């Protein structure tokens, strides 16, 4: 396990390759009407966490990833005492980015808006076959500036390699995202599965029911973007949030 800029680990060949291919093929087309489209200055992506829309392989996979047996293995790997599943996949499920897709560097919500549990661990699995890292799309991990309470600088980029899983602790000022618009060809998509795990809430945790975004360098003096960031994080968290 890596400990800088926060605890994370990378697992290549996460699924048996035949399963990973099936999961990739089960993604709906980018133009499917069931996607939730996030298109604003902070993010350009689509997602779907509705169990009723998952085909058989995807449905059984999300079931397994939320099972006691799998969660126990996560606890052992990440040296975490206790984790709870989020059966509702709040902010998780299928994620897809087209050319131009992006996600500003951010901290995830800290307190689940339904269960009031603390978010502890993210599992993300890349599922695009044949992705060229030159197109971007790698998940960036940034260090934390203790003085400003904002992201300091990019420390790690985890390339978007098919069937690669990333686990990281979200309680350690875990700034992450893909702030540079991806440049994949038209018709190629960055696909991933996302599952989040909770733990008992600490009395010291800063309560945040929506993700807290940081502006990109070219947005730092854009008051509309700064106001949007503030307005977004102060919402009550009842909408679908990452």
Image (cartoon, helix red, strand yellow):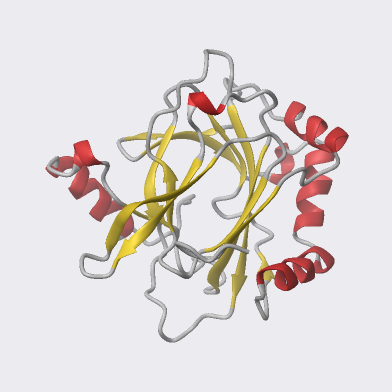
The residue that appears at 16% across and 41% down in the rendered structure is 224
- In front: 41, or 105? 105
- Residue 131 figure quarter: top right
Q: Position of residue 177 (x, y in %)?
A: 44, 46
- Position of 55 compared to 197: left or right? right
Taking the view exactly as shown, the residue that stands out farthest to the bottom is 203
Q: Is residue 218 above or below residue 182?
A: below
Residue 59, visible in the rendered structure: yes
- Residue 78 figure quarter: bottom right
Q: Is residue 5 above or below residue 223?
A: below
Picture mark count = 0
Q: Position of residue 154 (x, y in %)?
A: 37, 49
- Residue 59 figure quarter: top right
The residue that appears at 40% across and 29% down in the rendered structure is 181
Taking the view exactly as shown, the residue that stands out farthest to the top is 186
The residue that appears at 68% across and 43% down in the rendered structure is 164
The quarter of the rendered structure image containing the N terminus is bottom right
- Position of 64 compared to 149: left or right? right
Q: Position of residue 228 (x, y in %)?
A: 24, 46
Q: Is residue 225 above or below residue 69?
A: above
Q: Is residue 14 above or below residue 112?
A: above
- Position of 214 compared to 175: left or right? left
- In front: 3, or 180? 3
Residue 37, visible in the rendered structure: no
The residue that appears at 56% across and 38% down in the rendered structure is 159
- In front: 7, or 238? 7
Q: Position of residue 60 (x, y in %)?
A: 84, 47
């Amino acid at each position: 396990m890596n400990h800088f800029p926060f605890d994370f680990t990378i697992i290549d060949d996460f699924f048996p390759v035949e399963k990973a291919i099936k999961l990739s093929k089960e993604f709906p087309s980018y133009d499917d009407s069931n996607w939730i489209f996030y298109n604003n200055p902070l993010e350009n992506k689509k997602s779907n966490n509705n169990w009723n829309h998952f085909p058989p392989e995807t449905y059984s996979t999300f079931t397994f990833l939320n099972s006691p047996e799998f969660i126990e293995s996560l606890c052992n790997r990440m040296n975490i005492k206790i984790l709870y599943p989020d059966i509702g996949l709040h902010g998780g499920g299928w994620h897809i980015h087209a050319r131009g897709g992006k996600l500003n560097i951010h901290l995830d919500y800290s307190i689940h808006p339904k269960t009031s549990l603390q978010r502890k661990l993210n599992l993300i699995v890349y599922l695009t076959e044949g992705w060229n890292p030159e197109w971007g799309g790698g998940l960036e991990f940034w260090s934390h500036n203790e003085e400003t309470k904002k992201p300091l600088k990019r420390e790690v980029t985890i390339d978007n390699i098919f069937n690669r899983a990333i686990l990281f602790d979200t309680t350690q000022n875990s700034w992450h995202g893909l702030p540079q618009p991806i440049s994949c060809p038209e018709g190629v998509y960055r696909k991933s599965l996302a599952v989040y795990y909770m733990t008992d809430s600490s009395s010291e945790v800063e309560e945040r029911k929506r993700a807290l975004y940081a502006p990109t360098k070219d947005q730092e003096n854009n008051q509309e973007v700064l106001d949007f960031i503030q307005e977004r994080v102060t919402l009550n968290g009842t909408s679908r949030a990452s």
